[in-house]
């Protein structure tokens, strides 16, 4: 199990992920009326755009309708399924945005090491690598739910001593589902909970439920520490 959260979230079918770049391609086709013109608008090669569209249609079904010749010279338009897929992705992204803005875990701690802008903050739940302020050692570390990735403990990549990625073993305490987005709470000990944002499809596909053991990870560069009031 490996469930990435955040604005890179995607819709999946047959192991194919439909993400922001794919939505942009379909929107450009809809606006430009052809794949060639859409590729030019996006600064992408026509051949790669065509290959990607074929992959997406194999997984998600017909997304565009092509016409050849005729008075208008032919072109490419989105099918109802293509428009529905883009709309579904936009709802997913909007759901992530709304939840991420209000879902932040805050852990108090003390900066014990510094390497440039990055530092190690000692918290009750364990050390956290984060962007730290230069003027104080007493800080509050904020971890947004859209920065947290969940892994199966048996499939978690080996830790690298030089990695700037934080890892915490924990237990899922709640799963709050919406139409497209789910918020998963993970108890990481010391009375601290991290939230992670997943697609509702990912929750079903990965079988995430209350009581499941997981490893929560998040990048140091996506984690900010701010001065804590005395």
Image (spheres, grey):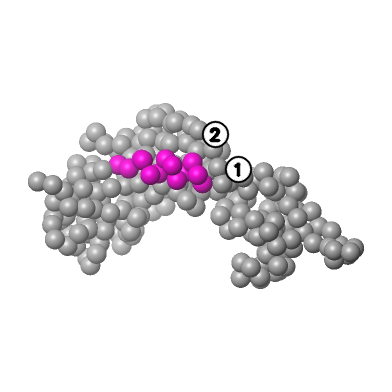
Q: Is residue 100 magenta?
A: yes
Q: Secondary structure at mark 1?
A: helix
Question: Height in image: 78 above or below 193?
Answer: below
Query: In front: 208, or 146?
Result: 146
Find residue 149 and report its horizontal and vertical position in percent: 42, 47
Instruction: Report the side of 99 relative to 43 (left or right).
Output: left
The reply to whether residue 22 is in sight is no
Q: Residue at x 81, y 57 (%)?
A: 66
Q: Residue at x 75, y 55 (%)?
A: 77
Residue 9, given in percent of the width and then of the height, sits at 51, 48
Q: Position of residue 188 (x, y in %)?
A: 30, 38
Mark 1 / mark 2, whichever is N-terminal = 1
Q: Magenta stretch: dominant SS? A: helix
Specify the segment rendered in magenta: 93-105
Badge 1, how many Cα within 10 Å: few under 14, some, many 20+? some
For the residues labelled 1 and 2, the Cα–Cα distance comes to: 10 Å
- On the image, the x and y values in percent for residue 4 come to 46, 48
Tell me: 36 left or right of 128: right
Q: Label for residue 179? A: 2
Residue at screen point 77% across, 59% down:
76
Identify the residue position indicated by label 1 in the image: 88
- Residue 103 in view of the camera: yes
């Amino acid at each position: 199990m490996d469930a990435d959260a955040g604005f890179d979230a995607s819709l999946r079918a047959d192991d194919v992920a439909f993400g922001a770049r794919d939505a942009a391609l379909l929107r450009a086709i809809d606006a430009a009326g052809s794949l060639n013109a859409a590729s030019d608008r996006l600064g992408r090669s026509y051949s790669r755009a065509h290959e990607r569209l074929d992959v997406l249609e194999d997984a998600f079904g017909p997304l565009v309708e092509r016409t050849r010749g005729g008075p208008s010279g032919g072109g490419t338009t989105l099918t109802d399924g293509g428009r529905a897929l883009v709309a579904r992705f936009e709802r997913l992204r909007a759901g992530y945005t709304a939840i991420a803005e209000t879902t932040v875990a805050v852990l108090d701690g003390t900066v014990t090491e510094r390497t440039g802008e990055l530092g190690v903050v000692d918290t009750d739940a364990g050390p956290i690598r984060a962007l730290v302020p230069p003027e104080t050692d007493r800080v509050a570390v904020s971890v947004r739910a859209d920065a947290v990735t969940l892994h199966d403990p048996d499939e978690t990549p080996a830790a690298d001593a030089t990695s700037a990625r934080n890892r915490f073993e924990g237990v899922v305490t709640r799963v709050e589902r919406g139409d497209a987005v789910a918020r998963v709470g993970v108890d990481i000990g010391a009375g601290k909970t991290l939230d992670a944002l997943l697609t509702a499809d990912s929750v079903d596909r990965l079988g995430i439920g209350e009581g499941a053991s997981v490893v929560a990870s998040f990048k140091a560069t996506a984690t900010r520490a701010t001065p804590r009031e005395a």
